Image: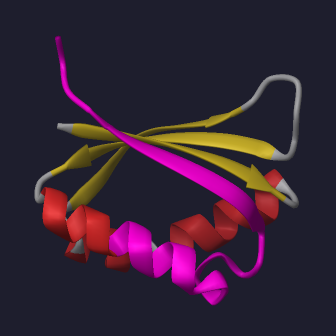
């Protein structure tokens, strides 16, 4: 199973630094980053594809990330996440 996250951010570079700094928390949640995209026409949008090892832990990571704006250093203004699987 994978998860696709879309982020509206204040600045892509600042968000990416904060996202990279959260790598240990993602690993502990059973998440592996497969791909990160900066939207071609916007420096304030990012998308991430993650491999999900444990859906419950991934959900807990999402809830914690939504609750703790310090995790993203205040760079995320809104986000959405979708669990997906190959059809």
Up-down: is 11 above or below 86? below
Q: Report if residue 66 lies within the magenta region.
A: yes
User: Camera-side residue: 79 or 40?
Assistant: 79
Q: Residue at x 66, y 50 (%)?
A: 7
Left or right: residue 53 compared with residue 68: left
Residue 71: image x %, image y %? 58, 82
The magenta region covers: 61-87
Residue 26 appears in view: yes
Residue 34: image x %, image y %? 36, 39
Residue 86: image x %, image y %? 18, 18
Up-down: is 57 above or below 7? below
Where is the N terminus found, in terms of image quarters? Answer: top left
Q: Report if residue 76 lies within the magenta region.
A: yes
Residue furthest to the left in view is 54
| Residue 31 falls in image quadrant | bottom left
Left or right: residue 69 compared with residue 67: right
| Residue 56 falls in image quadrant | bottom left
Residue 64: image x %, image y %? 43, 81
């Amino acid at each position: 199973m994978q998860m696709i996250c879309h982020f509206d951010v204040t600045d892509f570079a600042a968000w990416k630094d904060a996202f990279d700094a959260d790598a240990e928390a993602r690993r502990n949640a059973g998440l592996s980053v497969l791909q990160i995209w900066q939207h071609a026409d916007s420096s304030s949008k990012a998308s991430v594809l993650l491999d999900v090892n444990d859906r419950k832990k991934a959900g807990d990571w999402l809830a914690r990330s939504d609750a703790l704006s310090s995790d993203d250093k205040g760079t995320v203004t809104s986000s959405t996440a979708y669990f997906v699987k190959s059809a």
